[in-house]
């Protein structure tokens, strides 16, 4: 029998002061060992995976590790130019915490998209002292593009099915999603980076399909396609395996019924995850879908990542980013004393102001009966009016959460909303009618490796122009839309180059910077102290 091979990974996922998880995909069933811990693989649709949970680690340590399959070392790869993969546990003394984030990364094939910022970051990082490596990486959506496949993937798809039949060159099932993840994470620099820096993730629309869950009209139209049910099932199943499972720490893995069942020894877990996937899109069903939102703690820093796609309420005349149960969970998770509160959501909370007013105006117009409502719905889908401002009640509720948290006794020094999606990067400062104890920022970094057409670049620049924002806001108010409960202004950007953003937190001090990916490497665009 041939030796089992390492197909993808290792990915270093959840790391705290005393524990870590390492994810792998293998070519067959086996026992996976990392340091002193081991785990059997589980099977999904003929593919094999393992999540090794390590506990009892010492705080503030840096430990090189190998991956062994049935006792045979398969990682690190021979003659790799990169340093050893390491597990670096969090220190207990509140040392500086550096988080890197971004979104929207297409695979390496697309040279026309410019220099891949994540590849550039990994190449630079391997030459830096370990003290300058980031403690965490946050990928804020569009990890894979299920609806915009590469030529290589299309050639592979053509060996499986007739691409003249819908959905053509888009992916249809778990096997095809597995191919996308391998294609996206196989670049040697990125593979090493993901094995060394703990990574957290959340999906956005292209992980499923462009404009996913924009409205109930969009959703019902997609459900009429005979291939859509299988596509959505494959999307949720693969997302759970490749992304969501690693977002959970050891305690959460034990408490989560699905994770506990999947990791309970070897075996085929296809049917279990298929049931979970089929329930996940049933927004008002009797069975609560999986909660894709999650939280992380890095010493005195709280990271709260909100699902702004799958959990939307769209039917019955209601529009909400999350159902009531999950929104309450988000609000409760923001409580407590933190030096900094980071809120990750793939879609920006604070868009360029003109766009924010127009999205809220469009949401109100879509409620009108007859032709006017249908035209507004066409505008919503054509213009991608799907962000927090297009779910105005949710926008306001998140604003109340930020204001309540930022004005409380023991408030964090900063509250930063980290986002992507919009294919340009900017930092914005928010101000509420009453002065908060916390400084509030929207930090948006997108794309890591993609682009925006020239007409959108012009539109996004114009969106920050005060006269245009005033006109859009005036139009919205005349149409019965309440003004937003806060103001905000751009303090860095917008920039349209491939980029990666960094947030460094030391005690109650914070600094953010944006690095643009040029052919010769990353170039710091600007550094911004985040001050109350």
Image: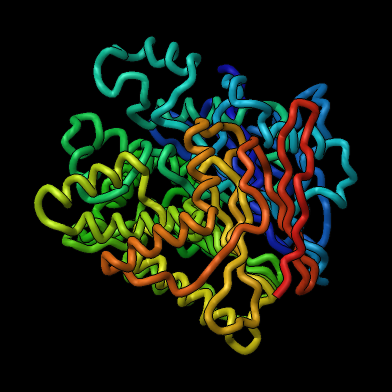
Q: Quadrant of the N terminus?
A: top right
Viewer-nearest residue: 265 or 246: 246
Q: Residue sitting at 55 percent across and 45 percent down? A: 461
Which quarter of the figure has residue 329?
bottom left
Left or right: where 200 falls relative to 62: left
- Residue 253 appears in the picture as rendered: no
Q: Quadrant of the C terminus?
A: bottom right
Q: Residue sitting at 28 percent across and 44 percent down? A: 379
Which quarter of the figure has residue 205?
top left
- Residue reaching furthest bottom? 409
Viewer-nearest residue: 107 or 289: 107
Q: Is residue 464 above or below residue 237?
A: below
Q: Position of residue 387 (x, y in %)?
A: 41, 53
Q: Position of residue 350 (x, y in %)?
A: 50, 60
Q: Position of residue 507 (x, y in %)?
A: 79, 72
Viewer-nearest residue: 514 or 33: 514
């Amino acid at each position: 029998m041939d030796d089992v091979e390492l197909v993808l990974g290792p990915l270093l996922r959840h790391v705290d002061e005393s524990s870590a998880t390492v994810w792998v995909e293998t070519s067959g069933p086996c026992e996976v060992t990392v340091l002193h811990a081991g785990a059997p693989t589980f099977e999904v649709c003929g593919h094999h995976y393992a999540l090794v949970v390590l506990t009892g680690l010492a705080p503030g340590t840096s430990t090189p590790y190998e991956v062994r399959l049935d006792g045979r070392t398969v990682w690190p790869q021979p003659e790799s130019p990169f340093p050893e993969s390491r597990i670096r546990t969090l220190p207990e003394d509140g040392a500086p915490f550096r988080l890197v984030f971004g979104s929207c990364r297409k695979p390496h094939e697309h040279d026309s998209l410019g220099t891949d910022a994540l590849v550039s970051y990994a190449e630079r990082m391997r030459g830096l002292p370990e003290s300058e490596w980031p403690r965490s990486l946050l990928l804020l959506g569009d990890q894979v593009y299920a609806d915009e496949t590469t030529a290589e993937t299309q050639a592979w798809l053509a060996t499986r099915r007739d691409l003249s039949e819908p959905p053509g060159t888009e992916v249809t099932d778990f096997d095809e999603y597995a191919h996308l993840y391998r294609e996206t994470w196989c670049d040697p620099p990125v593979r090493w980076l993901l094995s060394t820096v703990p990574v957290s993730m959340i999906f956005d629309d292209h992980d499923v399909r462009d404009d996913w869950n924009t409205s109930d009209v969009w959703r019902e139209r997609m459900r009429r396609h005979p291939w859509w049910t299988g596509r959505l099932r494959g999307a949720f199943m693969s997302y759970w395996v490749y992304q969501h499972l690693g977002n959970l720490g050891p305690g959460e893995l034990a408490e989560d019924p699905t994770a506990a069942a999947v990791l309970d020894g070897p075996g085929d877990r296809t049917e279990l995850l298929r049931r979970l996937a089929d329930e996940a899109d049933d927004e008002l069903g009797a069975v609560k879908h999986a909660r894709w939102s999650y939280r992380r703690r890095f010493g005195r820093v709280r990271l709260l990542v909100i699902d702004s796609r799958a959990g939307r309420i769209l039917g019955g005349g209601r529009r909400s980013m999350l159902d009531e149960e999950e929104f309450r969970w988000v609000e409760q998770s923001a409580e407590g004393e933190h030096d900094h509160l980071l809120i990750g959501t793939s879609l920006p909370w604070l868009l360029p102001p003109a766009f924010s007013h127009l999205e809220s105006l469009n949401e109100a117009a879509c409620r009108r009966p007859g032709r006017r409502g249908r035209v507004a719905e066409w505008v919503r889908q054509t213009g991608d009016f799907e962000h927090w401002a297009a779910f105005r009640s949710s926008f306001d509720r998140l604003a109340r959460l930020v204001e309540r948290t930022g004005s409380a006794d023991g408030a964090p020094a900063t509250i930063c909303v980290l986002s992507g999606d919009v294919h340009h990067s900017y930092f914005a400062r928010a101000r509420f009618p009453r002065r908060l104890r916390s400084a509030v920022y929207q930090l948006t970094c997108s794309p890591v490796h993609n682009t925006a057409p020239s007409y959108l670049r012009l539109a996004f620049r114009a969106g920050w122009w005060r006269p245009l924002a005033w006109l859009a806001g005036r139009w919205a108010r005349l149409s019965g839309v309440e003004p937003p409960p806060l103001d905000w202004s751009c303090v860095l950007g917008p920039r349209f180059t491939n980029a990666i953003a960094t947030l460094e937190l030391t005690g109650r001090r914070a600094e953010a910077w944006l690095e643009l990916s040029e052919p010769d490497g990353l170039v710091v665009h600007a550094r911004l102290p985040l001050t109350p």
